[in-house]
Image (cartoon, rainbow, N blue to C red):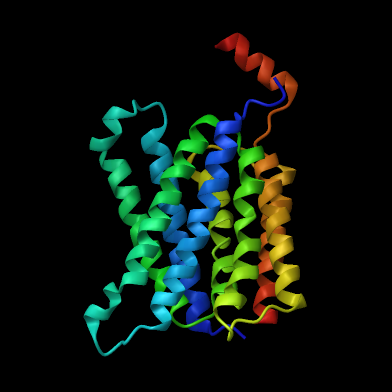
């Protein structure tokens, strides 16, 4: 069974990564490609991404790759929640189904590990 | 206009899943041989190569997302879960797959693909968008 520490660090890391996604999305929306290099939002998003990679590596040093890698799909769940809350994206049946499926998938992998 | 995703975007995203998967294997390899008493050992060759491979995959993904639809690209990205499940046990003998884990992986792949589908607009909405420019 996956340790509570690994679950916690993946939960936290994937939330940071999803926040990075959100910030990068806000940076690239309607922006000119050349100006992106100087966008504080883009760099902020990248730093969040970097932090989530560090969490990932910490988890990976303690648990098998075939367990840690699929657990990171939790990022998709956070991304759905954050983009509905902060980007005014609409929730729909597909998203509910997807969210539920990913969480069940994670539970199955936890049970098998 | 049922399919706006170019074959270029599809090739880019397939290459992206290759490089991100290779990056995972390199990271794991580097972390397995890590000596925690030596702080500098964190920067071993495998981990650095893992960052290069992962970073390359990330750039390819950004390029693909620029010119492709999520409904097509997400299911392809999700295949990386299959590659990891197959190759991790081959390279790391302590890593073993079982029915629970395969079940979870398949459920996650289907769910991520569904998430891509959720971005597909109805024909009416697409036509309206074209009119509005």
Residue B64, given in percent of the width and then of the height, sits at: 51, 37
Quadrant that contains the N terminus of chain B: top right
**Percent from the top left, x then y, of residue A45?**
35, 49
Total tally of numbered discs in the picture: 0
Which residue appears at 41% of the width and 59% of the height?
A: A16
Give residue B111's quadrant in the image: bottom right
Residue closest to the eye, B17 or A73? B17
Q: Is residue B34 above or below residue A83?
A: below
Rendered position, B40 above or below B5: below
In which quadrant is the C terminus of chain B drawn?
top right
- A103, above or below A31, in the image: below
**Residue at 39% of width from left, 76% of height from top?**
B30
Looking at the image, residue A79 sits to the left or right of residue B114; the answer is: left
Q: Position of residue B95 (x, y in %)?
A: 60, 81
Q: Pick out the residue farthest to the bottom.
A: B37
Front residue (pair A73, A81):
A73
């Amino acid at each position: 069974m996956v340790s509570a520490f690994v679950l916690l660090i993946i939960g936290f890391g994937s939330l940071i990564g999803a926040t990075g996604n959100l910030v990068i999305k806000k940076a690239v929306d309607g922006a000119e490609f050349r100006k992106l290099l100087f966008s504080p939002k883009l760099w902020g998003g990248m730093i969040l991404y970097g932090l989530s990679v560090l969490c990932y590596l910490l988890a990976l040093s303690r648990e098998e790759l075939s367990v840690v890698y699929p657990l990171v799909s939790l990022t998709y769940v956070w991304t759905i929640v954050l983009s509905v809350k902060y980007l005014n994206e609409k929730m729909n049946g597909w998203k509910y189904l997807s969210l539920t499926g990913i969480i069940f998938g994670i539970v199955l992998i936890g049970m098998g590990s | 206009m049922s399919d706006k995703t170019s074959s270029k975007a599809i090739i880019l995203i397939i290459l992206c899943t290759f490089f991100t998967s290779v990056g995972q294997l390199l990271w794991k390899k580097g972390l397995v041989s890590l000596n925690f008493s030596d702080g500098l050992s964190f920067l071993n060759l495998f981990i650095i190569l893992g960052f290069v491979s992962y970073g390359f995959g990330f750039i390819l993904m950004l390029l693909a997302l620029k010119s492709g639809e999520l409904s097509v690209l997400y299911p392809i990205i999700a295949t990386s879960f299959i590659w990891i499940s197959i190759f991790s046990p081959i390279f790391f003998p302590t890593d073993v797959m079982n029915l629970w884990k395969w079940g979870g992986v398949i459920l996650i792949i289907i769910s991520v693909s569904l998430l891509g589908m959720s971005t597909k607009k109805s024909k009416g909405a697409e036509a309206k968008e074209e009119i509005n420019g």
